[in-house]
Image (spheres, coloured by chain):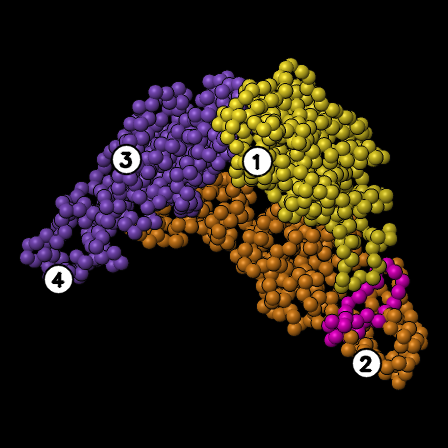
Chain colours: A purple, B yellow, C orange
């Protein structure tokens, strides 16, 4: 509040105005003294930055650089009515059972939801995935979904569930930055070649050919815990614009002009399809020798012509790899086709008794 | 035959005029009715297409599009004196014994030999290979050669010999499209890295640097059976212009203007050399420590000069890889030399007692 | 000496003037007869070539092509006071003990030291490395250093120490052509992926990005013996301008205008750093689960800002790979950082009790 009694920054207008984990304060200061507690971004004069002080007892205000530059010399009153005290760490956890006790683990975070892409998009898309998973008639795998505060939440969750997760989780995703429309981004697990990585990359190859591929060195979210040495869970991250890589990141500009319905739908789609890949990644095995006679099963045009039927071609190529050793995902990559497009073929061939599923 | 009694198409002029597996017919039809049984290629107006109807009881005539467009309205008599009935599937089989019971398997097909590159070139070059194999004083491997109808022939042959082939065949080739002069083409086995693949590719790297490399997805001949899941024979295909990839394919234009003596000789050469690679692919092992003193054996120029003798260099490089683990083919690839050029060096070194053959 | 009694070539002026291993001679010849015993380089008219006749009883003189062309017809007296007789092969050997009996083997040669890059630079840099190694307070490995004549010396040394070397040597370098300023060059071991290769290449990637990479086929020094089949020592060669690849090679022009203090220092540096990589190539293992809290250990800035501290980033990346399976060299390559720069981080983390050394 300035000398005239006007509130310069007000938590009710934006909760970013108060630095995260500020200690309580109620004092009068000069502008020079106040300036030592202000945070703004000269290169983004309209943005209020998101700043926190996790482990150091400080206080501060975040505001746009324009607003800061408009402050006149004089006496200011600063009031932060915070309280730092022992509390509890709450998180939400949901288990959706499947046929197998093997689990797919989905983790999203809830610690600064006033920003849209990073991070409210994560809980939003995760909720949509939960609804979709619950609507499925059959689920091969069990799904474990957690909504936690980033970093400290995943550490706490791991401290309580590590043995169970290591024993049961066969794939999983950290769900964040999944709502804007600019591009897809992929951040691999530390291993880089887990089922999660291969499933997500397979989908992005087909739906996001301009996907930006980051490396483990570019990480910065809960994969830091889930993939750390000794934990080693197979967690990959399919995103839209990655945290730290877009100008609005960690400012008030990360809002609903950046995150859009189509951006959210595209993010949901990348994750849903990756989960479908994992659900459907069986090992098919042809049970006859040689290329089967499809014509008498009504699966092949009876007139041989110069122009081959593309669909039959895909079916024949598919069959040629059904050796019981290659998974559907491997076959789809060999055929350069989306796994999704092969599910119908697989179904028909199983129906006709040509293909057995070796490993479900 | 048209109304004037003139034979419009005559099987005696080209056996492609009658669609393969036509049922017998003797009827009078209008041009409109007839047109439903005619096959021509508008984009290749001079070519008679090759069309078959394997499993559907139909009849039809194939003719050039020019000829078809010249047909006048009126009544036509159509006569096909065919007979579809149970019969026998004949194939030719030849076994040329070698020192080892391990076999190299050569397969070529004989079902539509009125076309030249695909397919008469196959039996022609295979016959030349047989003569050459029979002329060899020593053969390391036994050679099994079959002349069969495509697809159904290989299926029948496999049904009678599968156990024997799986136990004995260490390499082999499907011999087709091996007579024109345009290029070399290579189609790998399903595995893609069998001895057959490596031997054929080694040769093509040296004699056909512009070779077109296809993938398993481009297959379309008897490798479909020989390499299918559960059969898994190591059969690769070195060709000239590949079936389905040249304009004259499966038409009357695939004739002796396309297939030439030099085209056949080049195809023969690619296959003969690949077989030579397989025959000579031993594992040599030097039996002294360190680089042997070649001078006192008369193998090294005694004056050391700035310009090294290239031949001695190759010999020394060759020796440096004779560790008893690398095969001659691997060494040739490491040295970027044709295996053929190393046979002389190997012979000299074995003669001088420097090299032992670990595995013959 | 010509007819006027003038010494045309004199061993005292350059010991290259007499062909190596010349037999004794004291005769009078015409210029034509003499010419059959002269060696010069028309394309390098100022250079005296280095020529030897190892195993053939000959004699000859080497001189610049300019000097040769100035010779007038007439009678010449030739005198070579050599003696070819059974003798001894001397070599120097030094063992500097370390904590482990495992050895790093350094070999350099001493047979034609009147030329500077190839070869006096080798013994000079090796001597500097010995002084540096002796100055170290702790050495993880034992160092075995030999000064030998090329080829015959390494063969003799191997004949006496093979079993010991095969049992103990874990890495090593052939030290030659290590004194000029033009570039770095690397010649791999026969295996190509030994610890020596990986350590040397890691260093050259950072200090010599324009390094010329040769293959085993380009070899020509004592790696021919050390890496030959059945010997198989892990010996690689980091050089400056490689033997055989620079115009002054094996001539009188390979002198101290080519080899410079900075050239020698750069060569020394490449080898010293490669040895440091080998000495420090431990397997670190983080002993906490998840990303450790660095702030409370004074290792992390407490205010989270948009610009991350690069040094902390490297430390966190480093920790993320400390799984007890990856070596420091592998981690450095994953982080694209010089191993040298990670030693400090490793030390701090070990001091703070966060990292254990799995394998020393």
B226 on left or right of C159: left
Q: Does residue A61 appear anywhere in the picture? A: yes
Tell if the residue under mark 3 belongs to the same chain as the one under mark 4.
yes
Q: Secondary structure at mark 3?
A: helix
- Indicate the chain on which mark 3 is placed: A
The label shown at residue B67 is 1
Q: Position of residue C250 (x, y in %)?
A: 73, 66
Disc 4/disc 2 C-alpha distance (Å): 94 Å
What residue would you read off at disc 3? A123
Q: Quadrant of residue A74?
A: bottom left
Q: Which residues are magenta?
A: C38-64
Residue situated furthest bottom in the rendering: C4
Disc 4/disc 1 C-alpha distance (Å): 96 Å
- Indicate the chain on which mark 1 is placed: B
What residue do we see at 59% from left, 39% from top? B46
Crowding near the residue tagged with mark 4, few <14, some 14–19, many ≥20 C-alpha atoms within 10 Å: few
The label shown at residue A333 is none
Disc 3/disc 1 C-alpha distance (Å): 70 Å
What residue do we see at 58% from left, 28% from top? B4
Tell if the residue under mark 3 belongs to the same chain as the one under mark 1.
no
Crowding near the residue tagged with mark 3, few <14, some 14–19, many ≥20 C-alpha atoms within 10 Å: many
What residue would you read off at disc 4? A72
What residue would you read off at disc 2? C70
From the image, which quarter does the C terminus of chain B lie in?
top right
Tell if the residue under mark 1 belongs to the same chain as the one under mark 2.
no
Disc 3/disc 4 C-alpha distance (Å): 41 Å
Tell if the residue under mark 4 belongs to the same chain as the one under mark 2.
no
Residue C52 colored in magenta in the image: yes
A2 on left or right of B240: left
Disc 1/disc 2 C-alpha distance (Å): 87 Å
Observer-nearest residue: C63 or B31?
B31
Disc 3/disc 2 C-alpha distance (Å): 92 Å
């Amino acid at each position: 509040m300035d000398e005239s009694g006007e509130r310069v920054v007000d938590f009710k207008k934006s909760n970013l105005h108060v630095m995260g984990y500020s200690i309580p304060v109620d004092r009068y200061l000069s502008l020079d003294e106040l300036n030592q507690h202000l945070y703004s971004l000269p290169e983004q004069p309209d943005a209020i930055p998101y700043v926190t002080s996790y482990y150091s007892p400080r206080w501060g205000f975040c505001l746009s650089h324009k607003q800061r530059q408009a402050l006149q010399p004089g006496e200011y009153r600063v009031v932060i009515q915070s309280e730092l005290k022992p509390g509890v760490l709450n998180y939400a956890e949901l288990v959706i059972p499947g046929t197998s006790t093997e689990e797919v683990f989905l983790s999203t975070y809830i610690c600064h939801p006033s920003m849209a892409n990073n991070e409210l998009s994560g809980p939003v898309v995760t909720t949509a995935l939960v609804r979709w998973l619950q609507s499925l008639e059959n689920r091969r795998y069990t799904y474990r979904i957690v909504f936690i505060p980033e970093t400290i939440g995943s550490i706490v969750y791991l401290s309580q569930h590590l043995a169970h997760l290591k024993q049961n989780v066969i794939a999983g995703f950290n769900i964040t930055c999944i709502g804007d429309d600019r591009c897809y981004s992929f951040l691999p697990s530390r291993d880089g070649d887990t089922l999660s990585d291969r499933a997500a990359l397979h989908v992005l190859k087909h739906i996001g050919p301009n996907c930006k591929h980051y490396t483990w060195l570019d990480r910065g979210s809960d994969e830091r815990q889930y993939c750390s040495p000794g934990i080693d869970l197979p967690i990959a991250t399919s995103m839209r614009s990655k945290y730290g890589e877009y100008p609005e990141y960690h400012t008030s500009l990360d809002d609903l002009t950046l995150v859009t319905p189509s951006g959210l739908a595209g993010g949901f789609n990348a994750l849903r399809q990756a989960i479908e890949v994992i659900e459907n990644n069986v090992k098919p095995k042809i049970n006859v020798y040689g290329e089967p006679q499809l014509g008498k099963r009504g699966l092949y045009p009876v007139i041989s012509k110069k122009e081959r039927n593309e669909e039959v071609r895909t079916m024949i190529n598919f069959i040629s790899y059904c050796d019981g050793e290659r998974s559907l995902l491997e076959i789809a990559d060999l055929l350069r086709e989306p796994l999704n497009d092969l599910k119908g073929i697989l179904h028909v061939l199983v129906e006709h008794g040509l293909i057995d599923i070796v490993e479900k």
